[in-house]
């Protein structure tokens, strides 16, 4: 028997900024249990280590993405490990193979040889991969940012264009985060980054503005910073490369006179549209991949040579595992008469989710799944959820 363990989106950071990984003891306890399983393997489905919001990346300011990536060194890994010795001990004590699937917050690892070398020194049993595929069970694991238009890499005219989401995170931390840190409690700074889906953060800003009454209009402050961010060279390049036909709309959107109001109008229009079309885009992408695995080729820009995936000759999948959206899920359904599953490993971070117009709920549920694979390659999936909040935190803005 083999036991394949799936976890995702730990976002283990170096203690700076909005790093809120504080589950070191639970992490260690899980590994104490897992190492006693028969033939264990671990698959980290992306964003295991938080590089994007690390101090080394943020200290680089608004430099070009590829310049930042090239200049990173072992200190990015060392700072994280020094902050989390129990994580180091647990990973080093794991007896099986560790498959580290690259996401978007840790993409720097994939393209920086110094970061990879340091991880291999620490964890000789680790392999860093753009996706995980088990030929015996026909289970595929991919982070999921590849299906998120803001957080995926794209190849345009031979150039790999980094995701806008990376630049947004860096710009907002240097600008917007500093504004709200001066006027709001620290938990507000961290919680807005945990609102899911992300668009609901705009309503979250409105409610916080009403609650604190400190003269700071969070929504307009965010929009002002966002519009200024979109005027930067890296954001403009992303827009030109990905949406060349929207240049006129972009100019109108960024207009100094009407930009804020138009930006707010666009945001509110999208928010209203979401009420009528609440779709889990990762589940939708998973169902398409389960029907036709070769569709993944078109989403591998920046991660892998498409020909390599084609050479695997994957014509059928039994299941797909993702992370990225921090929303754990396990669903089984029939596709073309065969049972398939979609599994999302959620995140090791709290999530703030809107339940009604004026009510948000904060929850913190740590999820993992284990595929127990028999000698004949039949398998069953077991899942576990650990609730880290002693009671539900209801945030009522009425």
Image (cartoon, helix red, strand yellow):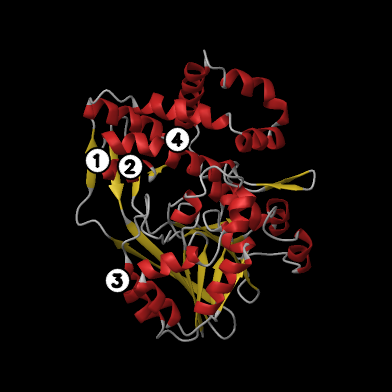
Q: CA distance from mark 1 to mark 4?
A: 22 Å
| Disc 2 versus disc 4: nearer the observer | 2
Q: Is residue 212 above or below residue 21?
A: above
Residue drawn at point x = 29 percent, y = 46 percent? 362
Q: Position of residue 67 (x, y in %)?
A: 63, 51
Q: Which residue is mark 1?
A: 185
The residue at which mark 3 appears reads as: 25
- In the rendering, at what x and y percent does residue 38 appear? 46, 86
Observer-side mark, 3 or 4, equals: 3
Q: Which comes before the other along the chain, label 3 or label 4?
A: 3
**Up-down: is 73 above or below 392?**
below
Q: CA distance from mark 3 to mark 4?
A: 33 Å
Residue at 42% in and 65% down: 80
- Give the mark nearest the N terminus, 1 or 4: 1
Q: Is residue 237 visible?
A: yes
Picture layout, residue 182 above or below residue 392:
above
């Amino acid at each position: 028997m083999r036991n394949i363990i799936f976890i995702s989106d730990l976002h283990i950071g170096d203690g700076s900024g909005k790093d809120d990984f504080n589950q070191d003891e639970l992490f260690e306890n899980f590994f104490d249990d897992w190492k006693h399983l028969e033939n264990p393997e671990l698959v980290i489905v992306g964003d295991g280590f938080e590089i994007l919001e690390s101090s080394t990346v943020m200290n680089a300011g608004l430099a070009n993405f590829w310049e930042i990536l090239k200049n990173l060194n072992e200190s990015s890994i060392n700072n994280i490990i020094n902050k989390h010795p129990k994580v180091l001990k647990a990973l080093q004590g794991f007896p099986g193979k560790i498959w580290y699937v690259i996401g978007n917050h840790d993409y720097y690892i994939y393209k920086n040889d110094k970061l990879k070398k340091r991880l291999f020194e620490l964890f000789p049993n680790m392999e860093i991969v753009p996706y995980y595929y088990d030929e015996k069970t026909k289970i595929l694991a991919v982070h999921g940012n590849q299906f998120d238009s803001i957080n995926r890499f794209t190849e345009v005219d031979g150039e790999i264009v980094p995701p806008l989401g990376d630049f947004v995170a860096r710009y907002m931390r240097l600008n917007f985060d500093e504004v709200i840190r001066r006027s709001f409690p620290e938990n507000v700074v961290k919680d807005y980054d945990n609102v899911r889906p992300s668009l609901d953060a705009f309503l979250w800003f409105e409610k916080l503005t009403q609650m604190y009454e400190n003269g700071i209009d969070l929504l307009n402050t965010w929009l002002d910073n966002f519009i200024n961010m979109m005027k930067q060279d890296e954001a403009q390049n992303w827009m030109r490369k990905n949406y060349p036909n929207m240049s006129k709309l972009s100019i109108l959107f960024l207009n100094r006179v009407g930009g804020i109001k138009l930006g707010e109008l666009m945001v509110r229009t999208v928010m209203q549209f979401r009420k009528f079309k609440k779709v889990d885009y990762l589940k939708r992408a998973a169902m398409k991949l389960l029907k036709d695995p070769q569709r993944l080729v078109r989403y591998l820009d920046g991660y892998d040579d498409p020909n390599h995936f084609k050479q695997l000759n994957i014509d059928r999948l039994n299941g797909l595992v993702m992370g990225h959206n921090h929303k754990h899920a396990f669903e089984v359904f029939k596709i073309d008469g065969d049972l398939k599953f979609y599994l999302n490993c959620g995140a090791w971070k709290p999530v703030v989710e809107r339940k009604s117009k004026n009510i948000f709920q904060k929850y913190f549920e740590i999820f993992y799944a284990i595929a127990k694979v028999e000698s004949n390659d039949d398998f069953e999936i077991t899942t576990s959820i650990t609730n880290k909040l002693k009671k539900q935190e209801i945030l009522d803005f009425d």
